[in-house]
Amino acid sequence: WWALWVLNIFLTGMNPFYFHAVNVILHCLVTLVLMYTCDKAVFRNRGLAFATALLFAVHPIHTEAVAGIVGRADVLACLLFLLAFLSYNRSVDQHHVGECFPPTTSPFFLLLSLFLGTCAMLVKETGITVFGVCLVYDFFSLSHKQEKSSNGVIHQRGPQQPASPQPPSLPAHPHRENGKQHRFPHRGAWGGCHSPSPPEPKSSGFPVSPRAVWSLMRYLTARSNRNFLLTMRPFLKRAALVISYVIVILYFRLWLMGGSMPLFSEQDNPASFSPYILTRFLTYSYLLAFNVWLLLAPVTLCYDWQVGSIPLVETIWDVRNLATILLAVVMTLLSLHCLAAFKRLEHKEVLVGLVFLVFPFIPASNLFFRVGFVVAERVLYMPSMGYCILFVHGLRKLCTCLNRWGATTLTVCTALLLLLFSWKTVKQNEIWLSRESLFRSGVQTLPHNAKVHYNYANFLKDQGRNREAIYHYRTALRLYPRHASALNNLGTLTRDTAEAKMYYQRALQLNPQHNRALFNLVNFFFGKAFPKYSLSILWANCGQMT
């Protein structure tokens, strides 16, 4: 990412237009690669792949990642993420896909996938999640192939429709073992690898049949199948290689960071500094639902969601917990729907949508380490791919349940939604045209956010509009009294010397390592002809810093 940034400066200088043009080009490349991925590995339908890419291209949540220079890391990491996924998929023998676990026929593409995934991680930490996505997709999807006949009907390839000669480790006759005849009611791709499952019950309204769950448990345990580990050997080799490699590069990444994680302040992520475990758990859980809501309905968007934007969830009686419960129910049903992949044909769309939605967001979820933000819209750039896949898949399923007029109405509504998203994206880009419009929009969108008032006050101070700047500095302190930088900057604008001294001292009490407050306080005493006192303050604070 830094190399591309330096190249951008070398070729075009500091003109922001060219920085934005490169970001737009990268966003277009991501959209095209996503469409190709959906066509080859998800829907196998160009129309659905195009609809997914179109929704991704115009989604307003991408404005920060594409319009901001720092967001280039997310866009470039997403491009490398998709290329690594496609390379991993290419490394597996496509002629044997659907026969338990297909072998690796192209070590070059497997190594290329590891290289691209490493590049994605170096660009953005969330890029490393592509390896988890590849392994889950390999385990649940590549060993379950869907074929399309000439009349457009999708079929599953079962044990009686092999694409290659039967491995010698399996019985010679698919329905006879040890001289006994067996009937296999389950005709899916898993039927040739495991013992028969119970008779299939009648279909119910629940999205996961008991027979599918039984088939999954048989598949995962398979104690009676002596050849289970033998059939899994290709996948286990790939998994061992990928997991070992991930451990090595994670250690290397931690070594580059000096063996420690970044340090953040309370205003960056207030929930992580709460002394109560329940508050942290409820707030983190609600933030998951809040991020999903931003994908579903990107109505309220802001460049910064810190310091008071989202109050902490401190009790189980908070009404916001209903959103958390709803998200948990929906994600559980979608996961159970993936477990029914042994029977249903649409499992690949839901599976890819879920892993693309969940895995890239894990590093930003506060589950494993503290992050430096409450909500960051640019972090949703990669997870939005999974949302778009699930959205288009849901539209397709809904269309099959409607008549002709209902399907037409749904199509018109979808077109209107795309137009609405496009209009919102254009309006958001107008906000990012200048520093003033960006900071002013933050105050208008989240007036209870102390940081947006602080940023807008800094802009007003630079423009010489001191009276307005003082108002917004004081508003920031009213919303967050522990804002040391706001105290220091307010002291520089205050005409009353005693009041300015109070602001500087208060800033140093909150943050003894605040260099600007220390410098301003020393200058204050130098101006008052107290050089010895100013030097004593300087030495005392230098001792605290060291």
Image (tube, grey):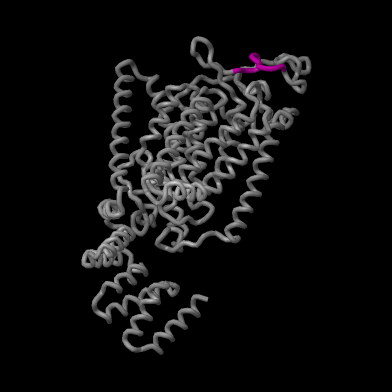
Q: Foreground residue, 50 or 352?
A: 50
Residue 134: x, y in percent? 58, 36
Describe residue 246's horizontal placement relative to residue 512 as left or right: right
Q: Foreground residue, 135 or 231?
A: 135
Q: Is residue 199 magenta?
A: no
Q: What is the span of residues highlighted in magenta in the rendered image?
A: 157-165
Residue 216: x, y in percent? 60, 30
Q: Foreground residue, 212 or 247?
A: 247
Residue 184 occupies quadrant? top right
Main SS category, magenta section? loop
Describe residue 361's horizontal placement relative to residue 214 as left or right: left
Residue 5: x, y in percent? 47, 49
* Residue drawn at (58%, 29%) of the image: 141
Q: Is residue 158 magenta?
A: yes
Numbered circles on residues, count: 0
- When the figure is inspected, residue 299 is found, relative to residue 106, above or below; the finding is below
Residue 315: x, y in percent? 38, 55
**Can residue 322 be seen in this snapshot?**
no
- When the figure is inspected, residue 23 is found, relative to residue 452, above or below; the finding is above
Q: Residue furthest left?
A: 467
Q: Foreground residue, 266 or 37?
A: 37
* Residue drawn at (30%, 39%) of the image: 426
Describe residue 289's horizontal placement relative to residue 410 as left or right: right
- When the figure is inspected, residue 329 is found, relative to residue 160, above or below; the finding is below
Residue 534 occupies quadrant? bottom left
* Residue drawn at (55%, 23%) of the image: 343
